[in-house]
Image: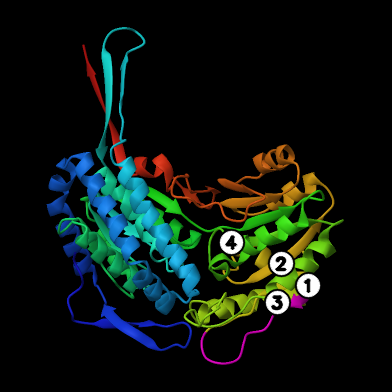
Amino acid sequence: MVLAPERSRFPVLDPADGSVIETVPAAMPEDGLAAVDAAAAAAADWAARAPRERAETLRRAFDRMTERLDDVAHLIVREMGKPFAEARGEAGYAAEFLRWFSEEAVRANGDFATAPAGTNRMLVQHAPIGVSLLITPWNFPAAMATRKLGPALAAGCTVVLKPAEETPLTALLVAEILREAGVPEGVVNVVTTDDPGPLTEAILADPRVRKLSFTGSTAVGRHLLGLAARSVISTSMELGGNAPFLVLEDADLDIAVAQAMAAKMRNGGEACTAANRFLVHESVAEAFTARLTKAMQAVKVAPGLEPGAELGPLINAAAREKVERLVADAVARGARVRCGGERLEGPGFFYPPTVLDRVQPGSELLREEIFGPVAPVMTFTDEDEAIRLANDTEYGLVAFVCSRDLRRAMAVGEEIETGMVGLNRGVVSDPAAPFGGAKQSGLGREGGHHGLLEFLEPKYFAFD
């Protein structure tokens, strides 16, 4: 594991009160290249290890993380802010990626066939793509790390992991767990920094780096794609979302509201999969909105380590200011506040659960990711309008459809331009499923067998 020298450090803040939790090394470009040196030096040995050996190492990491769920969860709460129960759920979810890819490590299967012309035989096998740069966000600091580390290590790649500057401590703990499980020195290298631009550019310019896996905003993803193009580096991009949540007129409203709460309030709305726009048939709009408002008003807002906390603070002051700006714009255009709508007084970056209805077309929060506990409600008159509104975005990560008629919900989901669809379900993520989107929401897939293939390259042999 390679960290920056102690020449400088930067603080990690607790979003519940703004206090400094700890300081970590502020890596410079030369530190990033030292991490690449370590990854390159370890690459041949790790790639040559038997798939079963890599699998067993990941399985031990799963066991070790499971043993330390409370440690991981406590750290997530401190630096990211989510309630402890939810943080513990994330820690378990993160561990599952290690277990899933421990099983996938032995399934990098190839192909054997006779050429159609009968002139030769064709053999295809898969090889590790090489040194990989993994860039993870702050909203799921453990799960987004293992969702990339699991397949990379299973495939036989060595990595440089750059966590978000807001949440580096969780990434360092995950790396410690991997080391305890037997991952050799140099296979996983963590660089922490509060100035990621020069560091990332230096790493991507190194010809030994052959893979970039990034989770974050579409704007940053576009920039990184440009940098990766200079060296023709393979990329996996899990970018922004603007998830529509459709409630058809035949929906079971009890189910719709329960799943709306899951889709909106998981991680406090700070998720790319969070429902960003609630599109509700006009005949059930008032009933749905009233029930959703009641459910949102019942959420307990408190620091994540306080007993019973259900919604913690936003990650920082800028995040709260963005949510305030989006709500203010919607209200200025005619939206009505059903609950919430104003920041909470006191320390920390808290914002209350908020429901808006009568949201007008053109409102900024219909275009931008809200990344907060705000549910804007619009109405539609028929399926065609609902689908048009759902597709009226540059993003296409996930959508949600509620209907008592599964066949109808499937048909609507098929018309929405998105990589994933939840049918009467507000959470779609699963380590065994391919996670990813369409349009400006990214490239490639994470999770499932597809996630392993992102870190493998097919090699074709022709012979008689």
* Residue occupied by mark 3: 297
Magenta segment range?
334-348
Name the residue located 48 percent from the left edge and 84 percent from the top edge: 16
Q: Quadrant of the N terminus?
A: bottom left
Q: In the visual, does 359 lie left or right of 172?
A: right
Mark 4 lies on residue: 274
Residue shown at 14% from the left, 52% from the top: 42
Q: Of the numbered discs in the image, which one, if any, rests on residue 226?
A: none
Q: Earlier in the sequence, mark 4 or mark 1?
A: 4
Q: Classify residue 407 as left or right of residue 380.
A: left
The overriding secondary structure of the stretch rendered in magenta is: loop
Name the residue located 55 percent from the left edge and 78 percent from the top edge: 309
Q: Position of residue 211 (x, y in %)?
A: 30, 49
Secondary-structure class at tag 2: strand
Q: Is residue 348 visible?
A: yes
- Please give the label number shown on residue 376: 2
* Residue matched to label 1: 335
Query: From mark 1 to mark 3, how far is it between C-alphas?
Result: 18 Å
What is the three-letter code of the residue carrying label 2? Pro
